[in-house]
């Protein structure tokens, strides 16, 4: 986190919340807060963290990058 009011921090969070709203919140009406909470956690853990391609990993998903790194470690041993 940067200084208070730093535009970069705000842009990153706005982008995340936009993705969250489009992929979870606006998909259907939620009956309870508990149901919504489970849907949010599931989306974050299954999609956002594992399947989202990341530029710092060479446009690979974290799962693909880790598999590639584990293969290289096994070959090096």
Image: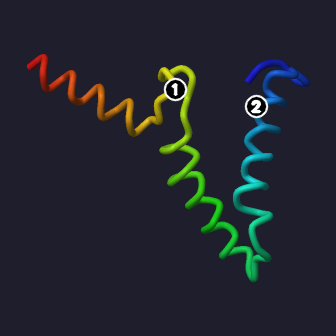
For the point 50% across and 54% down, the residue is: 46
Locate residue 30, reporting x and y percent.
Answer: 76, 77
Determine which residue is flagged by label 2: 12
**Which SS class for mark 1?**
loop
Q: Residues within 10 Å of mark 2 (few under 14, many from 20)?
A: few
For the point 53% across and 20% down, the residue is: 56
The quadrant of the picture occupied by the C terminus is top left
Locate residue 73, reporting x and y percent.
Answer: 19, 23
**In-front residue for pair 33/30:** 30
Mark sitting earlier along the chain (2/1)? 2
Whether tag 2 and tag 1 are in contact, CB under 8 A, the answer is no
Location of residue 16 by image quarter = top right
**Which SS class for mark 2?**
helix
Q: Nearer the viewer, mark 2 or mark 1?
A: 1
Count how many numbered circles sit on residues in the image. Answer: 2
Residue 46 - label: none
Locate residue 63, reporting x and y percent.
Answer: 39, 39
Q: Residue extending furthest right?
A: 5
**In-front residue for pair 51/9:** 51
For the point 24% across and 30% down, the residue is: 70
Determine which residue is flagged by label 1: 59
């Amino acid at each position: 986190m940067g200084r208070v009011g730093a535009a970069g921090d705000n842009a990153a969070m706005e982008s995340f919340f936009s993705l969250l709203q489009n992929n979870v919140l606006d998909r259907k009406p939620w009956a309870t807060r508990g149901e919504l909470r489970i849907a949010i956690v599931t989306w974050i853990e299954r999609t956002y963290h594992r399947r989202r391609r990341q530029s710092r990993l060479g446009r690979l998903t974290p799962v693909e990058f880790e598999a590639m790194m584990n293969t290289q470690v096994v070959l090096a041993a």
